[in-house]
Amino acid sequence: MSSSIAVSAQGPEHAPQAEQLAKKLGLPRAQPGRHYELLLHCCDTGLELVDKREKKQKRTVRVDFAKGQAAHRRRQQKKEMLVRAVGITEGMPPAVIDATGGLGRDSFILATSGCRVQTFEQVPLIAALLEDGLQRARLHPETKKIAERITLIQEDARITLQRMQRTGQKTDVVYLDPMFPKRQKSALVKKELQLLHILAKKDIQPDRLFLAALQAARMRVVVKRPVKSSTLTELPPSHSITGKTIRFDVYMI
Ligand SMILES: C[S@@+](CC[C@H](N)C(=O)[O-])C[C@H]1O[C@@H](n2cnc3c(N)ncnc32)[C@H](O)[C@@H]1O
């Protein structure tokens, strides 16, 4: 990570959390009077990542499933292409491994549709933001049940997928959303993606992740792609679900 980054606390009551996080993530505590490009900020509303690289425009990313876009998408879930791609039918929600958890929006949509989701995120800072959002969602009456269906594992998903291959264990569906090569229209997505791009440096070899996914899935593997980009590997998908900007390639097992 090339940016300077530190952990800050809104007030003394948030200091123990900031201390604990700094230790866990191997980051310094923010020192008064020093400028940092990114701040992981512990505050009343939860954990947020503040991008201070542009002086005029401070950007903040936090995971909040109870409000905003995530809540909207939850209401719109029937329309979600993701739900169709994963093959969710009434009363039969598959068990899903979301191997590229990120900020958890897709995991949340799947959990909203009844799936039990094991979400993997390999970048500790991103996993910390997601865990914070999930913890708050577990306390909110509207999102509690959904959030309880999601288990977050901070690890390279390949470790688990390869172990499953060795032991012959399977899950119903493996879902992959490897980092897009930039270009997104919505300002919100842009803001979040920019930060994910900075942090998720290790999002490499998604083709290997895909091959491991094929071995671990009982029913299908679903890969999210930008609408015009090529498939992740040379293997052609069984079918694709195509929207305006994104596409889901579905590989039936
Ligand atoms: C485009 S983002 C996923 C966004 C996510 N679908 C959402 O709805 O918020 C890709 C994420 O996958 C993570 N990732 C990539 N390869 C991974 C792996 N092998 N194991 C775990 N996480 C991985 C990256 O760190 C990054 O946060």
Image (spheres, rainbow, N blue to C red):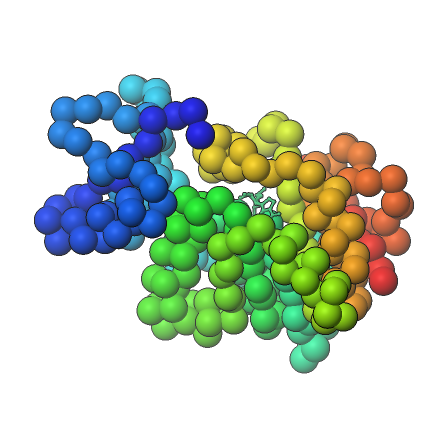
- Taking the view exactly as shown, the residue that stands out farthest to the bottom is 91
Front in this rendered view, residue 153 or 80: 153
Which one is in front, 155 or 167?
167
Which quadrant does the N terminus fall into? top left
Residue 185, image x, y percentages: 57, 31
Residue 149 lies, with reference to residue 80, above or below; the image says below
Is 59 positioned to the left or the right of 237 in the image? left
Q: Position of residue 156 (x, y in %)?
A: 58, 50
Closer to us: 161 or 219: 161
Give the camera-side residue of 91 and 8.
8
Q: Is residue 175 above or below residue 31?
A: below
Residue at image coords 70%, 48%: 209
- Place residue 10 in its image quadrant: top left
In the displayed structure image, the side of residue 88 where residue 46 appears, left or right: left
Q: Position of residue 4 (x, y in %)?
A: 34, 26
Q: How many marks?
A: 0
76 to 219, vertically: above or below:
above
Q: Is residue 143 left or right of residue 238?
A: left
Let me know if residue 34 appears in the view.
Answer: yes
Q: Residue furthest top?
A: 55
